[in-house]
Image: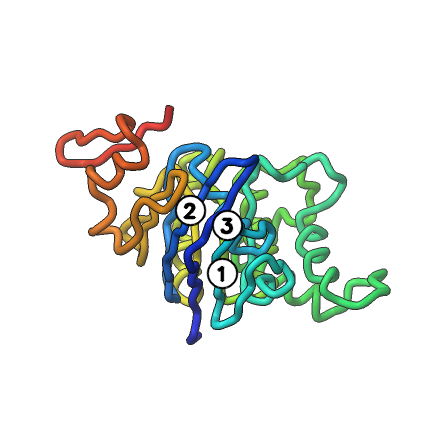
Amino acid sequence: MHNIFVRVEELTVSYRNEKVFSNDSFEAIGPGLVIVMGPNGAGKTTLFRTIMGLIKPDSGKIIVNGEDVTGSPEKAGKYIGYVPQLTNIYREFPVTGRELVEASLLLRKKPPRIHVPREVREKVDKYLRLVKAYDFANKPLSKLSGGQVQRILIARALARETPILLMDEPISGIDPRGKEEIARMISSLAKDKLVFVSSHDPVMFLNKSKYLMVVNKGIKSFGSPDKVFRLDLLREAYGGSVYLIEKCIHVFER
């Protein structure tokens, strides 16, 4: 897949009257994996929502695959699939995993939406199998583990078949084995797509990443992991929460 890129030009974004980004710019060219890291409240989710067009910036532009999508979720949605944080999903809603994926596709079709067309069912089956969620997809979300719900959310984003994915903390709240499996899946997806992943555990992705971005009320650094994952640059964002232990960098959230 060619011509996959996200370019942010001189972006300024405010949230609750506070500047989260101020005249920040970067360009990520895919396919590949972009890891976005920073402490809680640094602006990672705000950045993703701005790229998706859900937040209109004070100034600046979001260019996706050559189109200006600034402040337009309709335009951005043609190119970008979104996987939200698990904590933002209301799992008691009476819906199965399969129905959640189907609904995301049916919303893109004209009414009436009473029946699920065969082509939609086949596409849903394809992506549920791809993320190894097919066997439990007919269970209600309330009966699924965090890792299982995460797979459903990834299948929902993949089913829209966009060249770019934004994944907000996709391994948060998941057991260690599940984290490893989902991290491997995400790395595999990045072979054909441009995948942005925000994470408090970036080490799981670093060896497979094309870019690393460090944010904290602005983009502190952006580039290849070997140039960005450095003690001095990380301390600009995390302060004293970064330590060098036996030549390995560790980030401790407070």
Amino acid type of the residue that numbered disc 3 sits on in the rendered structure = Phe
Residue most extreme to the top: 254
User: Which of 165/117 is in front?
Assistant: 165
Q: Where's residue 185, x and y in %?
A: 43, 54
Q: Nearer the viewer, mark 3 or mark 1?
A: 1
Tell me which corner region of the image, top left, top right, bottom left or bottom right, holds residue 34.
Answer: bottom left
Q: CA distance from mark 3 to mark 1?
A: 11 Å
* Label 3: few (<14), some (14–19) or many (≥20) C-alpha neighbours in 10 Å: many
Which residue is pictured at 60% across the width and 62% down the height? Answer: 77
Can the viewer see residue 204 in this picture? no
Q: CA distance from mark 1 to mark 2?
A: 14 Å
- Is residue 23 visible in the rendered structure shown here? yes
Considering only order in the chain, which callout, 2 or 1, is on the residue closer to the N terminus? 2
The residue where tag 2 is placed is 22
The reply to whether callout 1 and callout 2 are in contact (CB within 8 Å) is no
**Image point (60%, 38%), residue name:** 88
Q: Disc 3 marks which residue?
A: 48
Image coloring type: rainbow
- Is 185 positioned to the left or the right of 135 in the image? left
Mark 1, residue position: 62
Residue 226 image position (x, y, % from top left): 21, 51
* 63 w.r.t. 154: above or below: below
Q: Amino acid at mark 1?
A: Ile
Q: Hey, which quadrant is residue 253 in on the image?
A: top left
